[in-house]
Image (tube, rainbow, N blue to C red):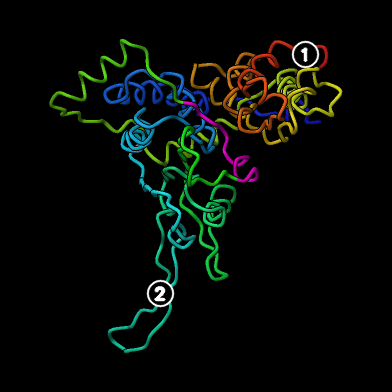
Amino acid sequence: MPTSSQRPSLEASDDLALADRLRDGRAAVLAELRKVIIGQEDVVEQALTALFAGGHCLIVGVPGLAKTLLVHTLAQVLDLKFSRIQFTPDLMPSDITGTDIIQEDAETGRRRMAFVQGPVFTNILLADEINRTPPKTQSALLEAMQEKRVTVQGRTYTLEPPFFVFATQNPIELEGTYPLPEAQLDRFMFQIVIRYLSEDDELAVVQQTTAIQDQSLARAMTAAEIVAFQRLVRRVPVADAVARYAVHLVRATRPDSPLAPQFIKDWVTYGASVRAAQYLVLGGKARALMQGRYHVSFEDVAALAAPVLRHRILLNFHAQAEKVTTDTVITQLLAAVARPSAGLA
């Protein structure tokens, strides 16, 4: 176990100044996004948390709720390179990663193989309707998401940081779709659910989008700052009790765990992996800095339980028959799992 002198801290003046810049940058990004995106405060906060933590997001919502607009606007405000891939049944892996083509040298007349980069070579990649393409093509993103690189014809190409994948899914159309493999689902830090707006917000959207639109968006931060913020997030200290709480939450999702409540044994086939606990802590660090704090609280972990866990819990047919959702399970889990005391740290 690391000693207190080995644990990360934010005591250096440079770190504190960068933390202030992150907090101010978050406020600036929110101000710019609100020019275009109305409502969806939780969705925007979760997207920014994942961005500062360096994670990818799977965004689920019915058509017309501004999933694509949110990602595109975020890329503009952050001044990042943006690519969009419309996933279709005939999409090939090379359409994502790129491929080698034969080129002729104009001076020598010799032909050689040259690599042409695909849309994955960007900062923010929007994988639109990712479940509309077969698993072979879906898996082309696995290496990019996990290792920040792609391999084509035996050659490895590194992606320029920062690199984020925002994938969208339509939850109501199942015909012609291919469910994402669990291995790829686990690569997404958050599954963000976009729901219908309130009546007042929906009215505001209708009024804004049916009038003349002349919105200019200011650049709130740079790619270099985002990379620095991601490094800073990992330096935020977390108490052993808070980290243990994240681990307890994740272990309690597994039916064969001694920590699992009875409703988990009744409703869940498979629980979350250790990656979920890692993301709970990492996301908690980013959330703390975004709110101007230099330590992670139990509330940070609890607030991120739904987006981190909802795509990592596999329900059985008993839960489906009773119309139990993963969000229902997570809500009950947060009530059932006790927060460790500092004495257990």
**Residue 208 pos. (x, y %):** 21, 21
Q: Where are the magenta residues, as a range?
A: 181-193
Element assignment for label 1: loop
Judge whether residue 124 is colored magenta.
no
Judge whether residue 183 is colored magenta.
yes
- Mark nearest the camera among 2 and 1 is 2
Q: Residue 197 vs residue 7: left or right?
A: left
Q: 167 or 34, which is in the foreground? A: 167
Q: What quarter of the picture does the C terminus occupy? A: top right
Q: Residue 5 vs residue 47: left or right?
A: right
Q: Report whether residue 124 is seen.
A: no
| Residue pictured at 41% horizontal, 43% vertical | 128
Query: Label 2 belongs to which residue?
Result: 101
Q: Amino acid at mark 1?
A: Pro
Query: Label 1 belongs to which residue?
Result: 340
Q: 29 or 5, which is in the foreground? A: 29
Q: CA distance from mark 2 to mark 1?
A: 58 Å
**Residue 181 pos. (x, y %):** 62, 46
Label total for image: 2
Which image quadrant for residue 322?
top right
Element assignment for label 2: strand
Q: Report whether residue 236 is seen.
A: yes
User: How busy is the neighbourhood of tag 2: few (under 14 within 10 Å), some, or many (20 plus)?
Assistant: few
Q: Amino acid at mark 2?
A: Ile
